[in-house]
Image (tube, coloured by chain):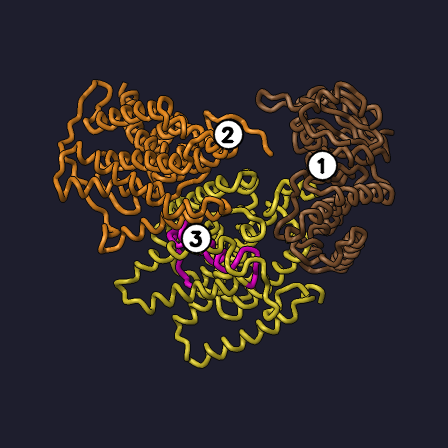
Amino acid sequence: MEVLGYILQQLVNGLQLGAIYALIALGYTMVYGVLRLINFAHGDIFMFGSFVAYYLIAKWQMPLYLVFVITMAATALLGLVVEKVAYKPLRGAPRISLLITAVGVSLFLEYFLSLDSMFTPNYIAFPRPFDVVAYDLSLVAVTNIQLIIFSVTAASLFLLYLLVYRSKHGRAMRAVSHNQETASLMGINVDATISFTFAVGAALAGLGGILYGFAYPQINVFMGIMPGIKSFIAAVLGGIGLVHGAVLGGLVIGVSEVFVSAFLSSSLRDGVIFVILLLVLLFRPNGFFGKRREKV
Amino acid sequence: MKALVVTGLSKSFGGVQAVDDLSFSVGEHEAVGLIGPNGAGKTTVFNLLTGFYRPDSGAIEFFGKSITHMPPFHAVSLGIARTFQNIRLFASLSVLKNVLVPILGRIGYGPHAAIFQSKNYLDAEEAAIVKAMKLLDFFHLSHKADLLAVSLPYGEQRRLELVRALAADPKLLLIDEPGAGMNPREVRGLLDEIREVKKSFRLTILVIEHQMGLIMNLADRLVVLDFGEKIAEGTPEEIRKDRKVIEAYLGEEFTC
Amino acid sequence: MTFLKGAKRFLIVSAVVYILLKCLFLSGLATEYVQQVVLYALVMILGSLGLNVIYGYTGQFSLGHAAFYGIGAYSSACLTHAFGVDSVYAFLPILFFGGLFSGLIGYLIGVPILKLRDDFLAIATLGFGMLVRVLLDNSDKVADVVGGSRGFIGIPRITNLELVFVVLVFLVVVTRNLIFSKYGLFWQCIKDDELASTAFGIDTARMKSMAFSYGCFLAGIAGGLYAHLYTFLHPSNFDLLKSIDFLVIVIVGGMGSITGTIFAGLLWVGFIEGLRIALPSGMLELRWVFIPIFLIILMMLRPYGLLAQKESKFLGIDKT
């Protein structure tokens, strides 16, 4: 009975982490869908979200709902700026150039923010504007933070679903991911759609940053690297370009990571994720929800 | 023995049946034209013949040998070479180097011979260059040997595609729309060149072509496709009068 | 000797450079630190040459090159430790073995991942690089001397000017000979148009694997030289930033240019070390702020690098 309780507890913990990964993975998958670009800087946008939230809470004592709104707006803005300044000029360039540029943007964000005049390279304690409360449910204990994370994530997913499948903007996004040229011939403003996609993806990553701060209250300018890569792996696992794939992938990766940490060894945590990646790329490169594509 | 025998070949993509139960043959030293309106599946047939696509069903035989599931890079060693409809020259290579590729593809020397520049390697490389230059000479392109292949004018690039395919010493040559984008004078010159090539190199040729003026005067026989199915087969004279063919082409440019 | 055919000019130039450097070192004008930096630059050139074969010529975007550099470094250091080697002659087979081991790992990893398209290959190599990093961090659980995240200390200082020069010149000639043969030609074909390559008889899977394994081999040799130059290894030396170092050298120098790699290697290391000396310590972090900006601008202006595809007649590397 105790073992079951322990497993369930780790499952809950894993879902907490997985929900955050899912939010980040969504940004990757949506941008990849419209641009076929792996936005290496996405993990750093997540990091930026954490830092903005930290500032708003710690320095300006803002009420929580404002923190959410402003942080998501700020990260959306950053996403837009990155797209306009670094990626748009390279639209027709060889794909490798875009990849290298993305890597460059990522490094720039990390090291610029690590300067002493900015956020410094140190770890900073993220202030929780409320106390942690654990609810004992006989087999497992769930904290209020976890409830917040689950509910906020679920709400965002629902809103995202409405956006992507029930709105004009969402239709445009789906059309552009299918075929840019055809979409533009049908009157869709491709540039605006791409920018919009970046903004939405970035806002979700920013949201993930806030929730991450609540859950694991130590932030650092390099904190985006590993979650960024893991979230990308999650997106690939679920099927790159597919929204439901990103969610499933995020949850799977989160749960796997916590389970490996709990049952094997925490230092092997990251290693296992990469093994998962290599296995996915080997056997189901199109991901869980993806279809088998014909070559040529 | 027939050079090429295609039996019941089918291929679909998603819901679209690109090639539907196609059967035809090409005799040795024949020139067969594969024609049909746009989207009829002609290039798909080429891709199936050269191993780029795997057929859903059907069989392909090349001089009696089954090549239905051949990996694409085997084509050259078996004696099949092709050109591409939308010109796929190697952009960073010179004219000469583009032609060298299929020649060197058939020459056997291993990495150790290359690293230590053995006599075998040096002789093979020299022979390859000699052969490539001879071919370029035949097509009056040898003076441009060191230019970047993609810097050539369009018509010459098309001819270079042909030279490159011939460098593979093929028995069967698949030519995909050789006349595309050329003016009538260039097309006439091309026609003569292909005829000359067929004779000198003793080739079997399968040509996809849109321009009736070119194909009618080149092919011994025509196979007509529409929506992936064979709708007619025969000599140019017979095809010209075939009602099904005329109907299929209604709405398309039909110049005789 | 036919191995050196066509390389006479390059050998002469190399000999001259060697003599100049040797005089510089012996004269006492160059401090110990500067000597180490010069040797490090040569080691980086070798490592980058490997990435140039993989990416510059064959077009396979690898973000995990540092992992193979690290595998060579650690494996050769383990062997010198195990056999108590301290002479250059005894070291040579170990160095070679370190390279071979890296090349072998490269070959094995390549089997599944080289089929992937460029952006997925980038992620796969990135992931592999990080996997290796995790393994190195935990390596002390396998063998305590390797030090894990404490670092591997006490590696004998065997690398000197002569060793680096001989190895580098030899491998440049080997690489050059490969590049100018059908292998180099096929590699470039694959970079240009993989599909058309298969249509003309190129076994692309085999050629890609060969380029990748050989590139990893070169990285492994470079790693072995590095380990026995700085005598200390830490897993953080072999992370994504190091892979990007190699990538920058290949891109700045120009894809598909051996000469470019040589010049860019010297330039890049010189630039980084120069900044370290020139900038007051407070400004040091700015290096990694400007480097990515430089990279982004380079991508906008010259996506294929500065000397792409050109070889130097002066250095004697071009085809005779």
Same subunit, labels 1 and 2: the answer reads: no
Alpha carbon of mark 1 to alpha carbon of mark 3: how far?
Answer: 43 Å
Label disc, if present, on residue C300 of the rendered structure: none
Specify the chain shown as orange: A
The residue singled out by tag 3 in the image is C244
Q: Secondary structure at mark 1?
A: strand
**Subunit that carries the residue with mark 1:** B
**Percent position (x, y) of residue C275?**
35, 66
User: Which is more foreground, mark 1 or mark 2?
Assistant: 1
Give C1 or B89, whichever is nearer the viewer: B89
Q: What hue does chain B carry in this figure? A: brown
Q: Which range of residues does the magenta coloring cover?
A: C230-259
Residue C245 falls inside the magenta stretch: yes
Identify the secondary structure beneath mark 3.
helix
Residue at 55% of width from left, 62% of height from top?
A: C92
**Chain letter of disc 2 in the image:** A
